[in-house]
Amino acid sequence: MGTSNYCVLPFNSVSISASGELRQCCNAGYDGSNTYVSELDINGIINNNFIQDIRQSFIENTQHSKCSRCWKQEAMGSMSFREVANRNKYYGIGQSITNRKKVIEFEDIEYIDITLGNKCNLACRMCNWSSSSLLAQQLKELGKHTGPIDLELDDESKNKVIELFRRSVNLKSIYMLGGEPLINPLNDEILDLLIETGQSKNIFIHYNTNLQVNKIEDYLEKWSHFKGVELQASIDGCEEVYNYIRWPGNWKKVLRNLTTAVQKGNDDTLKVSISTTIQNINALNIPKLINMCQTLEEQAVPFFFIPVVGTMTLDVTPKRVLKEAIDLLEAMPKRMQIPIDDLLANYRDAYNLKIDKKKVQAFFDEQKMFDLKRNQNLFETIPYFIELADEFNIERW
C-alpha cells in the first residue's frame, strides 16, 4: 500500500476547536465534523466515527474530501499543512514506523492542538467575534452580532480534556490558541497537570499570544518545567499604531513583556517570534516595528507576516504610502529571520491593484463605527487616510 497521500495527524493527534468540536487538524477549515467532546466519552475523543473515517482514507492512500485545503495547496505546487506535519521533528513521521491503525490508543497521541475558547482581553480591528470575547461584546452592543459572547468548553468537557492530557503519556507537542490562551484558566490547569505528572519535561508547547498579560514572570517559571516553549507574539505595529489596532492594548506593556521573554529565553528552551498582520492601517508602521524589534537584548527576533482579509487589506492604502513603505523595506539589510522579500511581494501586489471604491467605503464605515465606540480617531492616528478619504469623497469624523 502506498503512502503518497498519508498524513500523520489523524493517527497521533487530537484537534479541538473553541466550541469543543473535534477536527482532523487545525487546518481543517470550516467544513466541520459535527463531532463534539461534550457528546463523547473519553475514549470517543480519540476514536469516533468522524476521525476513523478520515483514518480509513489515509490507510487506503486516498484523498479524503474533508482534507481538501491540503490537496488544493499541493495541486498548486505549495507545501501543505499535511507535508509540514509529516516533517515535524516533534510528532512527524521521522524514522518511526507509520501508524496505520483505524483504532488508536492514548499512548499513540503525540500532539494536541486546542483552541481554549474566545476569552480575550483585546478587541483587535482585524479580528472576529469567535476569537475575542471582548470584540463579541462590542459587536453585540453595536448591533453587529447576535450570537454568543463567550465561547468555552462546559465543565464536563473541560474535565474530559484534562483527562485526555493525563492519559496521553507519550505527548510531545501542544499547540495552544485562543482567544488569548495566557488568560484562560484552562491553560493553567493543563500546565499544572503536566508539571505534576512529570510529562512536562518531554513536551514542547507553542502559543499564539498577544502578550498583554500581567506577571509574565509567573509563566516563565511554569514554562521552565517543559522541554521547550515557543511564543509567537501577535504584534501588528508599534507605539500609537499598535494601540489603535489592538484596542485596548498598551504598546509599552507588550514591548516590556516581549523584551522580558527574549531576555529569559534561548534557542533550546524558550523561543520568541513576532507574528504581524499586513494591513492598510500599519502599512507605513511595519518597517518601524521591524527596526524596533528585530533585535532585543542582543538577540535576533524572527518575524512572520500574514495578510489580513476583509476591508483592511493593503490595497486600500494611498499609492504614495505604499511606495514609501516599499522604499523603506528595500533599503533594509536582508536577515534570515525576517522574510522581507515575501513582505515586499505583498506591498508590490497591492501597489499594482486599482483601489476599489466600495471597499474604501466599507473600510471607513467600519473604522468610524469602532472609533466612536472606543474614543479613537483614524485620521489623527494615521494621517495618510485623510488623503484617501478626500480622494473618494468620504466625510471625515
Image: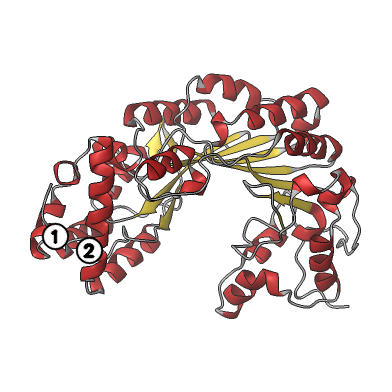
Tell me the quarter of the picture where residue 24 sits.
Answer: bottom right
In front of the other: 189 or 199: 189
Residue depicted at x 75% and y 58%: 9
- Picture layout, residue 395 above or below residue 158: below
Q: Is residue 302 visible?
A: yes
Residue named by callout 1: 388
Tell me the quarter of the picture where residue 25 sits.
Answer: bottom right
Query: Which type of secondary structure does the marked residue at label 2 adopt?
Result: helix
Residue named by callout 2: 360
Measured as percent of width and height from the top left, residue 123 is found at: 40, 40
* CA distance for labels 2 and 1: 8 Å
In front of the other: 195 or 189: 189
Q: Is residue 192 left or right of residue 270?
A: right
Type of residue at label 2? Val
Measured as percent of width and height from the top left, residue 76 is found at: 55, 79
Disc on the earlier residue, 2 or 1: 2
Can you say which quadrant of the picture contains the N terminus? Answer: bottom right
Q: Are marks 2 and 1 in contact (CB under 8 Å)?
A: yes
Q: Is residue 93 visible?
A: no
Q: Is residue 282 left or right of residue 14?
A: left
In front of the other: 9 or 344: 9
Residue depicted at x 47% and y 33%: 211
- Picture layout, residue 189 above or below residue 100: above
Measured as percent of width and height from the top left, residue 88 is found at: 69, 55
- Picture layout, residue 61 above or below residue 319: below
Q: Is residue 182 left or right of residue 124?
A: right
Give the number of marks: 2
Type of residue at label 1? Leu
Measured as percent of width and height from the top left, residue 147 is found at: 51, 48
